[in-house]
Amino acid sequence: MTDVQVGAPIVVAADKAELLARLEKHRRLSNVPRSELEWLVAHGTLEQYAAGLLVARKGRNVDGLFIILSGRISHLTDQGGSWRKVIEWRAGDVTGQLPYSRMAGAPGNSVVEEPTEALRIPTADVRALPVECPNVTAELVHVMLDRARTFQSSDLQVEKMASLGKLAARLAHELNNPASAAARSAELLSGALVECETAARELGSAGLEARELALIERLRASCAAMPTGVLSPIERADREEAIAGWLSDHGSDDSLAPALADTVLTLGSLDEAAAAVGADRLRTALRWVAAGCTVRALARDIERAASRVHHLVSAVKGFTYMDRPSATAEPVDVAKGLADTLAVMGTKARGKSASLTVDMPADLPRVRGFGGELNQVWANLLDNALDAVKEGGSVRVTARADGSNVVVRVTDDGHGIPPELKGQIFEPFFTTKAVGEGTGLGLDIVRRLVDSHAGLLDVESEPGHTEFRVTLPVAK
């Protein structure tokens, strides 16, 4: 982008016949009656703009209608703390204040990228266009609709990219723990296998009788059985200490205690083994049992970590609809979409020690629409709810069938929305977050996406209770 400069355009004394000829060749106005082009020439001013000149500033009124004859102007909006190009106008385009436009102020900055020449119609005369130049007005209505679609598409893309960035960061954080656990367990597994082989050879040379060997194998089988219930850290330490004491009392290596403590093995079964096997052979047998328990425990850790990674990847795949076409609407499973969204939002909830609960029936009807877009609705609403709650707060998601509709509610116990801001929260670029923390497009995108699905979006808020309610028609 050209560096922004402060200055004013140069007014050119134009030959009216030459200017009229240029308008007759203008891409947007070539089919307009000559009489209307003459009106534009009579009421307009031919101006030249140097590269870098700011012709519209964010939030300020736009100074008229600009019929671009040559050059290039870019429009940039502040998106998440950085300026990004949204639209570009060249020779043959029309921009600025358009008839019937409700634009109160420029949504961003319009900067001249290269020397530009344009016929500017003052704002006061733009208001007269529908009466004086109906054909020009009809053409400019199309321009306004195209511009609105461009801005809407840009806003949606910006919010999608922002959501994708957040999703990638959360996914990286979420995947790091199971991936690290799997790598750590795999590294330890190599040494555990060596120990298991060594212990097996010693057991084979111990000369155990068939009855004794069967008893020891029953001990080792306890490694495969998963304990019922979860021990607290204190209970786990007490159990390990008790087993270590037993091993020391029976002349065995007490370093085997951690491996044995994570099984369902009991002190009674150890007593039975000690009674049946001599002390020397007992030491060898327990070493083999502990080595087998260690290998099984590490394998379970790797399996759990891999399963967690698979679950997360499946959730993200479902959340983004990355393997499904999105060209046409289809029946969408809202329950699955909410579950996938909750899975990818879990990291943020845990980061604030917030409870994130969901309540929806198994037979929730499907709605017709685009699954990826609806998941973006749920993600934005959950993201805002988690931002609103304090440490240890609560966010609740419910979904119910209500006649011919499905109603999804996202409720939080945060600080609420001040009454004076309720009318602004769905406006584009409005945000109460710090610079760089939000695009101000989240709720605006939610509103647009819900509207595009023929749904309704409502909000009720007071301190300690805010509820966003999305109502969507059931798929026929």
Image: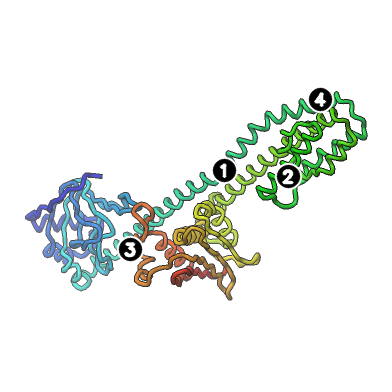
Residue 202 is labelled as 4
Q: Is residue 454 above or below residue 83?
A: below
Classify residue 434 by image quadrant.
bottom left
Point out the frontmost of discs 4 and 2: 2
Left or right of residue 386, residue 216 in this image: right
| Crowd rating for badge 3 (residues with CA inside 10 Å; few <14, some 14–19, many 20+) | few
Q: Position of residue 50 (x, y in %)?
A: 15, 48
Real-space Cα separation, disc 2 to disc 1, in angstroms: 27 Å
Nearer-the-camera pick, 455 or 15? 455
Count the marks: how many? 4
Q: Earlier in the sequence, mark 2 or mark 3?
A: 3
Q: Earlier in the sequence, mark 1 or mark 4?
A: 1
Q: Position of residue 313 (x, y in %)?
A: 58, 47
Q: Are marks 1 and 4 in contact (CB under 8 Å)?
A: no
Left or right of residue 274, residue 324 in this image: left
- Mark 4 lies on a secondary structure that is helix
Q: Position of residue 26 (x, y in %)?
A: 22, 56
Real-space Cα separation, disc 3 to disc 1, in angstroms: 49 Å
Residue located 43% across and 66% down the image: 415
Instruction: Residue lying at the far bottom in this picture: please name it.
Output: 403
Q: Earlier in the sequence, mark 2 or mark 1?
A: 1
Residue located 54% across and 67% down the image: 408
Point out the frontmost of discs 2 and 3: 2
- Mark 3 lies on a secondary structure that is helix
Left or right of residue 97, residue 165 in this image: right
Classify residue 43 by image quadrant.
bottom left
Residue on which the image places disc 1:
177
Q: Earlier in the sequence, mark 3 or mark 1?
A: 3
Residue on which the image places disc 2:
239
Residue on which the image places disc 3:
145
Q: Amino acid at mark 3?
A: Leu
